[in-house]
């Protein structure tokens, strides 16, 4: 009787407090006492957690659906040279050589057949994935030499799973952490997470085309989160520097963010109250970066190639990651150099090849400069211990990183179409600043990937993901949270161009993108211009991304250049 009337009801009450009424909770002697009603705050937190879990589940489900399509080069769909297949075979081959060969041969083994050309952390992850494939699928899946072109479905499912697990572990967690700081309220946070996790371009590249970009992107986002967090410098900025070093060592494409985070951290060092404090901060950051790089690169020095030696092996690994011999660009990408390489401009033919790299560097630095100056100012004012100040610093770094990513994509040397993910990842977390612009850029980024989607036979996935993204954006609570906030009105408040001009650009670009899809589907290219559609995609996409660069740079400069100034100082200046 004691168990029945005392223990069991208390267990139920403690487990499901919302189910107990105010008069059904008995004491040990059988008398009933009033049970406290569940607080509204607890109910709200529970609902927010459940909704966030559903949104995360939607992101995983969407990735799983896209992953059911064949990856890049599957069945040797677009073999144009000596190597079989595409990026899927490249990633599988790296698992094969890292699992079987000594570390001294990882970057020298048969470079003509998908030679390893990513940084060391990617090589270590490839080794781990190769071990998993050897154990779970079978030795034949990563047999050295004999496994080339291995495309069994169980092996494909395993590799798709590794992409998904790493995506959830690194990228999803970074998005949730940043959303928790930028959007403290439940509805706003859910809208932000929804938009960031269901980005069409991210889903199509990593889970359709097949790559591990979200690992590098997630590490970069985690570094942004840490360097702008409240707390001691060593616990925030130094940890953030280590995370960004890991991102650089996973994929060299994260160099796009390096000037932005360097400018911000340099401002943090300059913001110290004394020269000694500034010097100690700089030394702490430098030591953390050097230690991280040393830990990842040291094995290539200790176990070198017999002919190259320790230093030569390290330099060879570095050269493999930056193939300047390939020229200014290879495919049709939506950047300035591809768009200007059409008649009558023909920029690549008119400028000597020896000047291509210096010209690209100069143009990139010119586009980078405004956002980096703004980030330096934001970093100098980040020592103020207020939550709003650190939140604004995070926003400033995300805007600046987006501007830096677009600067590199538009003007740097050897740009790939997949590099559009660099500005997209931080920008997708800024939907509460300019929701209309972020939604527009999300579509533009995916649209520029269309030639690659055709090559990979992912047309169905492309249109399906874009449709699902629009439904989620406009037909759910997250979309309702974003839609009423007119981004053009916000744009006018910060002194941007007129609303009419912004509307014309937005509507005109959407109309042009749809028109090009229709024309390509109905009108075959002329025989003398077989590449006319990829060229049109490059030119139109470049125009849209130039507009996006202007917006991100303008917002970064006008909104965050005064983050370093305290509200009282700004008030005195206004007076």
Image: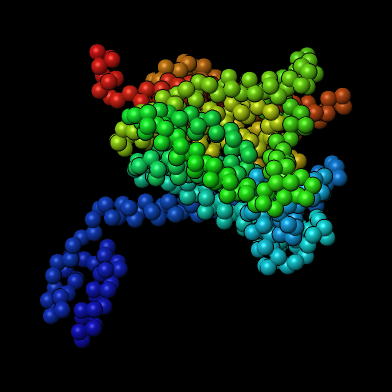
The x and y percentages for residue 202 are: 59, 42
Q: Between residues 387 and 43, which one lies in front from this camera angle?
A: 387
Q: Is residue 28 above or below residue 160?
A: below
The picture places residue 379, in percent across and down from the top left corner, at 41, 30
Q: Is residue 54 visible?
A: yes
Describe residue 221's horizontal placement relative to residue 526 as left or right.
left
Residue 259 appears left or right of 534: left
Count the numbered circles shown: 0
Compared to residue 248, the image places residue 436 above or below, namely: above
At horizontal 31% and vertical 32% (from top left) the residue drawn is 384
Residue toward you, 218 or 537:
218
Q: Residue lying furthest bottom in this view?
A: 1
Which corner quadrant holds the C terminus? top left
Residue 522 visible to an observer of this rendering: no
Left or right of 380? Residue 438 is right
Give the quadrant of the N terminus.
Answer: bottom left
Query: Residue shown at 26%/78% (left/top)?
Result: 8
Instruction: Describe the colour scheme in one phrase.
Output: rainbow
Tell me the residue at 19%/71% (across/down): 24
Q: Position of residue 51 (x, y in %)?
A: 41, 52
Please name the residue shown 26% across and 65% down the image: 17
Provide residue 573's location: percent of width, then percent of height: 28, 15
In the displayed structure, 45 sits above or below 407; it is below
**Front-most of 193 and 554?**
554
For this view, does 529 lie left or right of residue 39? right
Residue 547: image quadrant is top right
């Amino acid at each position: 009787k004691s168990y029945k009337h005392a223990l069991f009801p208390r267990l139920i009450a403690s487990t499901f407090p919302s189910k107990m009424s105010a008069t059904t909770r008995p004491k040990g002697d059988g008398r009933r006492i009033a049970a406290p009603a569940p607080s509204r705050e607890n109910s709200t937190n529970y609902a927010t957690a459940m909704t966030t879990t559903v949104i995360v589940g939607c992101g995983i489900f969407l990735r799983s659906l896209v992953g059911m399509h064949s990856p890049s080069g599957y069945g040797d769909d677009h073999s144009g040279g000596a190597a079989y297949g595409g990026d899927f075979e490249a990633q599988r081959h790296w698992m094969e050589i890292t699992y079987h060969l000594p570390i001294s041969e990882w970057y020298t083994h048969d470079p003509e057949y998908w030679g390893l050309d990513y940084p060391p952390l990617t090589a270590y992850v490839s080794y781990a994935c190769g071990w998993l494939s050897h154990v779970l699928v079978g030795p034949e899946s990563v047999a050295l030499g004999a496994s080339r072109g291995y495309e069994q479905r169980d092996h494909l499912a395993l590799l798709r799973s590794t992409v998904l697990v790493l995506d959830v572990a690194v990228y999803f967690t970074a998005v949730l952490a940043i959303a928790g700081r930028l959007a403290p309220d439940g509805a706003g946070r859910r809208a932000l997470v929804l938009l960031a996790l269901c980005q069409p371009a991210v889903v199509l590249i990593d889970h359709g085309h097949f790559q591990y970009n979200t690992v590098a992107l997630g590490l970069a986002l985690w570094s942004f989160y840490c360097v702008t967090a409240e707390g001691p410098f060593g616990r925030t900025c130094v940890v953030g520097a280590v995370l960004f070093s890991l991102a650089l060592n996973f994929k060299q494409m994260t160099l796009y963010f390096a000037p932005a985070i360097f400018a911000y951290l340099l401002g943090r060092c300059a913001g110290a109250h004394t020269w000694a404090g500034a010097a100690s901060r700089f030394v702490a950051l430098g030591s953390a970066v050097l230690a991280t790089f040393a830990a990842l690169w040291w094995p290539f020095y200790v176990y070198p190639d017999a002919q190259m030696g320790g230093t030569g092996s390290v330099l060879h690994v570095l050269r493999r990651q930056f193939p300047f011999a390939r020229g200014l660009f290879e495919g049709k990408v939506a950047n300035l150099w591809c768009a200007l390489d059409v008649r009558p401009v023909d920029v690549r033919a008119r400028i000597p090849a020896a000047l291509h790299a210096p010209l690209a560097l100069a143009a990139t630095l010119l586009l980078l400069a405004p956002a980096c100056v703004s980030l330096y100012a934001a970093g100098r004012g980040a020592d103020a211990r207020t939550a709003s100040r650190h939140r604004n610093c995070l926003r400033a770094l995300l805007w600046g990183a987006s501007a830096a990513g677009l600067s590199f994509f538009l003007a740097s040397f050897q740009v790939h179409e997949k590099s559009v993910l660099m500005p997209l990842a931080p920008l997708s977390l800024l939907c509460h600043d300019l929701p209309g612009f972020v939604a527009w850029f999300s579509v533009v980024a995916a649209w520029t990937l269309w030639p690659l989607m055709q090559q990979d036979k992912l047309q169905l996935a492309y249109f399906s993901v874009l449709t699902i993204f629009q439904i989620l954006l406009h037909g759910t609570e997250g979309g309702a949270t974003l839609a009423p906030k007119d981004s053009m009105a916000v744009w006018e408040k910060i002194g941007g161009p007129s609303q009419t001009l912004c509307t014309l650009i937005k509507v005109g670009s959407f109309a042009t993108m749809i028109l090009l899809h229709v024309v390509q589907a109905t009108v075959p290219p002329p025989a003398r211009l077989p590449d006319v559609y990829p060229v049109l995609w490059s030119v139109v996409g470049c125009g849209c991304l130039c507009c996006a660069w202007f917006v991100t740079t303008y917002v970064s400069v006008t909104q965050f250049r005064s983050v370093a100034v305290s509200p009282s100082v700004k008030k005195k200046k206004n007076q």
